[in-house]
Amino acid sequence: MVPVNYYIVLSAILFTIGAMGVLVRRNPLVIFMSVELMLNAANLAIVAFSSVYKSFSGQIFVFFVIAVAAAEVAVGLALIVEIFRTKHSINVDEMNSLKG
Amino acid sequence: MHLSETVNTGFLFLAPWLVFSPVMGLLINIIFGGRFSEKGIGWLASAASGASFVVSVLLAVTVAGNHGEVLRWRLAEWISIGSLTIDWTFRVDSLSTTMMLAVSGVGTLIHIYAIGYMHEDVRFKNDIGRFRRFFVFLNLFIAMMMILVSGDSYMMLFVGWEGVGLCSFLLIGFWYDKDTLGRPSWANSNAGNKAFITNRIGDFGFLIAGFLMFWYLGSFQFDAVFEKAQEAAHTMPWVIVAITLFMLVGVAGKSAQVPLYVWLPDAMAGPTPVSALIHAATMVTAGVYLVTRSAEIYMLVPQAQYIVAMVGAGTALFAATIAVGQYDIKKVLAYSTISQLGFMVAAVGMGAFVGGMFHLVTHAFFKALLFLSAGSIILGLERGHHHLAHGHHEERGKKKEERGHKEHHEEVFDPGDMRNMGGLRKTMPVTFWLYMTGTLALMGIFPFAGFWSKDEILLDASLHYPTVYLLLTIAAFFTAFYMGRQIWMVFFGEARHEAAAHAEESKPIITVPLMVLAALSILGGALNLPFEGFHNLTHWLGHTLGEVEGLPLNLQVAGISTGLALLAIIISWLIYGRNTLHAGQPDPLKKPLGFIFTGMENKWFVDEGYWAVIINPFVKGSQFLADVIDWRFWHDFVHDKVIAGTYNWLSNIALNDYADQRGIDAFANALGKWTKDLSAAMRKVQNGFVRSYALSVLLGVVLILGYLLLK
């Protein structure tokens, strides 16, 4: 059996890649994918700990995270489509009309 | 006393209907009266009063059936504070049923009379709203009077006492905006105020008596008070004296005794049925009833009894002398009423409670008769006056019609002034005979009702109180004299005004109730004939007041009073009847009596004295308080100078430009500027770049996690 440390390291690497993607990319679709990466990194960690502690609650929790992520994507994509229709661009740096 | 098994309560359950029936009458008239005709309103009110009379009769039968035992009907709990509980209980005994019968009986007759009278009043002018209001007030009066006489505690009696005072006020000022001739005037309204305010002084006495009663005797219920008073009479007699004397102040107010009688003559401003019902027959006897009801307390303190008797006797004589000098037919009767009330108060003061109640009942009959007949005379003269005005129209033809009309409206004609009357015996024969009946009863001529009741009082006085007897006998002489004077002036001689010559007799709706009252004035003496085997009223009231021996007829006392009355009639004939009085002639008594007659004419200047001693200083004091204390001191000085001045001075010192602008304003401005600057710096953070927000979030997470890991 693979030791849990490997899962955690993989999860940390995936999370860092996701976070960097959110920070540096300007295309919201890519940002979304990065967000998914972060979520799944977290999922991976949860599932790993769940198997270590022989508990199903972590796995159930992951199902919820996946379901929420799917809903979030549905809402986010709808927003992106609508923003593209009005601004003819989806560059996140141009979405600054709420600037103080 | 409890209602034992043996007591047959009979019609006792009807007791609340004494009050309910007139209240229902007035409610129906208030709510639906707008749809009724004049007759409908009047007869409904009369029926409501009549229902009260029927209930009174049934209650009297019930009391008689129980051999005079006191019966009570508890309607509801009224007041309950601490140890004090006052129930709304109707007390049905021989004394209260006597009052109920007199009030509702006379009241009903006067209701019927008023249907005819109010219609003919010159001020009426088919104003059906006023007509309705009049009967609502009359019914309210009956209801209140019933509460007064049927209450089982001093508090309930007080409710009725104030209620009838209110009705009296409302009805004296009934034509509050018009005088007797229908011209705009506040005289009636002022008379109402005078009655109300004078009665307040009396009520103050009653209230103090009530407070003393509660404080020292701990109850308001009649029997409880009497029982405690028996004990208190030994331990603290002054309390009983104080209670009785303060109660006497109340009696003096309500029953128009010296020194508070001044409102009653002015109360004649009310419509004549009101004068008859409230200010002669019923309400003003409430004081006599109160003393009789409190007989057991008064019996404990002979000193107080003596004072009550002297007040009554003094009033009887004093008012009788004033009546001699009056010209207004109703004013003479008003002073006569005060004088007769003096007889009653003297009687109950002497402990002759039965005599007082007997005179109260017979007086209710014959004084109501006299007042209502006087009303009939006034209407007759008004008809004559009216007839005259229209007669002249036709004679003078159309050309002068306007002028003739105008002249008659400018002429001041007072239909109540006896100097305008004379010779009415021929024009108003029915009223004449009715008036004669009432007069003979009032004079105390055998065998009319007044003879028996007055004689009983005089007899009692002659046995125990020689001073009172002397005063009352002189008063009786004056009574016969002023009534004789009135008869000669009104009914005999020549007509001193065209209106009197053309006076017309009244309709049956007015004369028929008078005939009933006349019959009662003749036969009323039968209530308590001073012969062996009679003394009915003495036995009847004895159930409540304690059995006393009825006094037999004393021929000496009766002979003296009758002789004096006859003498007075003869003297009055010599002065007023022998030589025909002419229009504009001064009173024949004026010359021989001189200033004494001026005094009688002007009511011994008592009103003027009250103005000088009490009212004017009071008004001056009020003006002083208003002008000097309130306006000049309080408003001008304290408010404007002291408070406003200090405030201005302080603001000038503390809030000048330096302190205001550089202190307070500078602080407020700096606060505002600081907030503005801070927000300008802070808004730079919100730069609109989503990624920089995300970076902030990341840094925040790293910081927090770092802290958590490394701490």
Image (spheres, coloured by chain):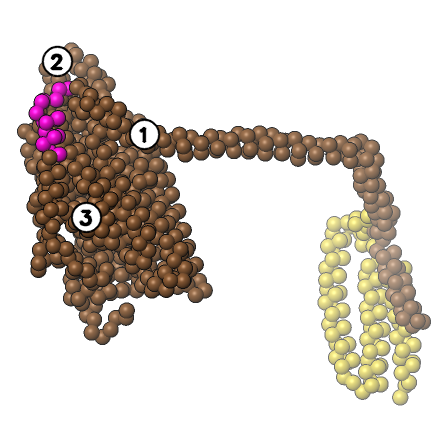
Quarter holding residue B80: bottom left
Residue B593: image location, x then y, percent: 21, 25
Q: In the image, which is nearer the foreground, mark 3 or mark 1? A: 3
Extreme residue toward the right, this view: B710
The hue of chain A in the figure is yellow
Work out how far the residue at label 2 is from the one at label 1, CA to CA, in angstroms.
46 Å
**Residue B396: which disc?**
2
Q: Residue at x 84, y 62 (%)?
A: A30
User: Which element carries disc 3, helix, strand or loop?
Assistant: helix
In the rendered structure, which amino acid carries the disc numbered 3?
Ser
The magenta segment is B568-583
In the rendered structure, which amino acid carries the disc numbered 2?
Arg
Work out how far the residue at label 2 is from the one at label 3, CA to CA, in angstroms.
65 Å
Please tell me which residue lies in front, B674 or B390: B390
Q: Is residue B289 above or below residue A4?
A: above
Residue B673: image location, x then y, percent: 84, 41
Q: Residue at x 84, y 81 (%)?
A: A48
Disc with the residue nearer the chain's start (3 vs 1): 3
> From where the camera sits, is residue B664 visible?
yes
Disc with the residue nearer the chain's start (2 vs 3): 2
Image position of B61 (left or right of B342): left
Mark 3 is surrounded, within 10 Å at the Cα level, by few (under 14), some (14 to 19) or many (20 or more) other residues, namely some
